[in-house]
Image (cartoon, rainbow, N blue to C red):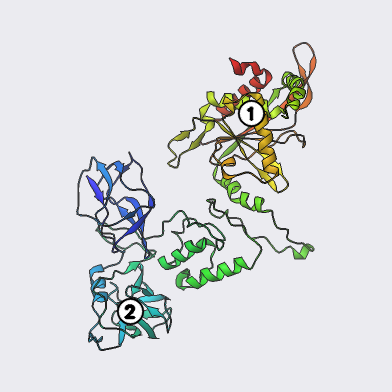
């Protein structure tokens, strides 16, 4: 059977999130996707038990009532289409109350002032949690005027008329019930619009008790709008923050994470003024870099204590490159990461490099040991494709990349940057050395383009001649592994008869333990050490 878009109360809405995949088993009333309009975000539930056979819409697509969303096989029962309605009682009565002015409101077209009363909320009394307009505001038909809150839900009450707010008879925190005057609109040109106006529930306060299938209204937008100069931080899933759809839309437009906003409304409700105050505070504080990267939720770290009692201090801003790297580096908080250590005997490999370097230098190519390591790593990744993969969003499979693209960490004056070496498995040592030199120079000259920095499948980070004996590099999400190289050093190695001086290169292989097992990482590191010990094995 096909599952189609129910009546959303609006002409069109956008698919903001698809909650299931093809092949998933779903149960009756299980949420399948989230659609969003200017008023609210709603989860559309399944009317039957079954298996998702196909998904007919995409994230970001605009849909309207009757559009096919999914096909479900093995459906055991079919019920009437589920209407995506707010989780409040007596929805029909609410709509009628809004569609028809009260008896005290004159319907004569000559009347220029109209009183807007509290509609039937399905409860005896509710509290005004937010007044969305002020005296003098010009409002349109369907524009939300106030938000009232009961034990079941928060509801935005729209205007049945277009006009100017002359007076407001209620205040924030006041208890109201059906029939009470809320405000007076002046300049009303006749009766209200004939189009039905549906009240939009915002975030549910307490699950409504009902036996009928319904949807839970929430904010489920996972990706913020494109950042502009006013964006100060990327938004995350704010569904657990108590705020109305209008406030959520404002937060998305400004790039604000509502978790960080101090709420001033009743019962901890975030108001528009709270969002504006937060933005003003951030814009007048220390500079914060904008970034289009998707960032994780707050790390949960407490704010810094006051250090003034222990002496003077001062703030030093990070470079723009360092600021831009913070969201990417923070993704490691969500990755179980382990590091495997090994040593590679590169004595013979270094002799080969020394023999070739003068010849390469005459051709304008600087030959470093990294060129050989890149070639050996690419060769090994072809045999160990799991290390050249990404964990899929469903957590049930991995996406194996068929091509090798190595991210090569380069230190610059502004910080670390990672250009990408394309298909080193198809290149000669000379070509790899030449491209490494070009990428390094472009990085230091700040001439790298977006294509030079994207699409890596595996990363190599080398400390070069900076010293140290080993380190634990951070996996660069969405990759699953990274190879760290520490400076090679002469060490006495026992050959069974005597100690021999050998040039040993420390290897540090960090990996995402969700994708790679420890035994596989140990085997990979050892295999790489063997290849570097005798690079002729690459030809076999």
Whether residue 516 is visible, yes or no, is no
In x, y percent, where is residue 217? Answer: 36, 61
Instruction: State the quadrant of the N terminus.
Output: top left
Q: Which mark is residue 483?
A: none
Pointer 2 residue: 162
Vertical arrangement, residue 120 with respect to residue 9, above or below? below
Q: Residues within 10 Å of mark 1 (few under 14, many from 20)?
A: many
Distance, label 2 to label 1, CA atoms, is 68 Å
- Left or right of 65? Residue 140 is right
In the depicted structure, whether residue 419 falls above or below residue 8:
above
Residue at image point 61% right, 27% down: 377
Depth check: 10 or 127 in front? 10
Q: Secondary structure at mark 2?
A: loop
Asked if residue 182 shows in the view, the reply is: yes
* Numbered tag placed on residue 374 in the rendering: 1
Residue 214 in the image, given as x and y percentages of width and height: 28, 58
- In this rendering, would 214 be left or right of 236? left
Q: Position of residue 58 (x, y in %)?
A: 36, 48
* Occupied quadrant, residue 84: bottom left
Which residue: 65% across, 19% down?
A: 535
């Amino acid at each position: 059977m096909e599952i189609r878009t129910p009546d959303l109360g609006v002409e069109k809405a956008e698919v903001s999130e698809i909650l299931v995949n093809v092949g998933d088993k779903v149960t009756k009333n299980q949420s399948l996707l989230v659609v969003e309009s200017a008023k609210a975000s709603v989860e559309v539930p399944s009317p039957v038990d079954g298996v998702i056979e196909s998904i007919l819409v995409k994230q970001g697509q605009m849909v309207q009532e009757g559009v096919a969303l999914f096909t479900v096989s093995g459906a055991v029962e079919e019920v009437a289409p589920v209407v995506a309605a707010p989780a409040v009682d007596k929805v029909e009565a609410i709509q009628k109350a809004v569609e028809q002015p009260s008896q005290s409101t004159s319907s004569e077209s000559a009347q220029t002032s109209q009183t807007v009363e509290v509609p039937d909320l399905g409860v005896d009394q509710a509290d005004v949690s937010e007044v969305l307009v002020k005296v003098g505001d010009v409002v349109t038909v369907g524009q939300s005027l106030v938000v009232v809150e009961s034990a079941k839900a928060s509801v935005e009450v729209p205007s049945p008329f277009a006009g100017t707010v002359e007076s407001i008879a209620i205040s924030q925190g006041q208890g109201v019930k059906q029939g009470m005057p809320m405000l007076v609109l002046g300049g009303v040109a006749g009766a209200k619009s004939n189009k039905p106006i549906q009240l939009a529930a915002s975030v549910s306060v307490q699950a409504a008790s009902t036996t009928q299938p319904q949807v839970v209204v929430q904010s489920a937008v996972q990706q913020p709008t494109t950042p502009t100069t006013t964006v100060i931080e990327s938004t995350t899933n704010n569904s657990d923050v108590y705020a109305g759809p209008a406030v959520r839309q404002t937060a998305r437009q400004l790039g604000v994470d509502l978790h960080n906003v101090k709420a001033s409304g009743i019962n901890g409700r975030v108001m528009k003024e709270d969002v504006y105050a937060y933005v003003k505070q951030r814009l007048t504080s220390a500079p914060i870099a904008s970034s289009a990267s998707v960032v994780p939720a707050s790390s949960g770290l407490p704010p810094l204590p006051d250090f003034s009692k222990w002496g003077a201090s001062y703030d030093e801003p990070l470079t723009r490159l360092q600021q831009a790297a913070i969201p990417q580096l923070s993704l490691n908080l969500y990755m179980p990461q382990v590091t495997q250590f090994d040593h590679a005997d590169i004595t013979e490999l270094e002799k080969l490099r020394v023999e070739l370097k003068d010849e390469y230098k005459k051709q304008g190519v600087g030959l470093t040991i990294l060129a050989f390591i890149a070639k050996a790593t690419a060769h090994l990744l072809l045999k160990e494709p799991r290390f050249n993969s990404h964990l899929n969003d469903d957590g049930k499979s991995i996406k194996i990349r068929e091509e090798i693209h190595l991210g090569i960490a380069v230190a610059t004056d502004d910080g670390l940057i990672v250009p990408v070496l394309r298909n080193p498995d198809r290149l000669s040592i000379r070509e790899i050395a030449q491209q490494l030199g070009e990428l390094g120079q472009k990085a230091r000259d700040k001439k790298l383009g977006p294509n030079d920095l994207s699409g890596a499948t595996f990363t190599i980070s080398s400390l070069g001649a900076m010293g140290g004996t080993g380190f634990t590099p951070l996996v660069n999400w969405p990759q699953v592994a990274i190879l760290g190289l520490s400076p090679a050093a002469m060490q006495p190695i026992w050959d069974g008869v005597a100690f021999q001086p050998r040039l040993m290169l420390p290897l540090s292989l960090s990996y995402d333990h969700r994708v790679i097992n420890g035994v596989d990482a140990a085997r990979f590191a050892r295999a790489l050490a063997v290849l570097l010990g005798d690079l002729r094995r690459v030809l076999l």
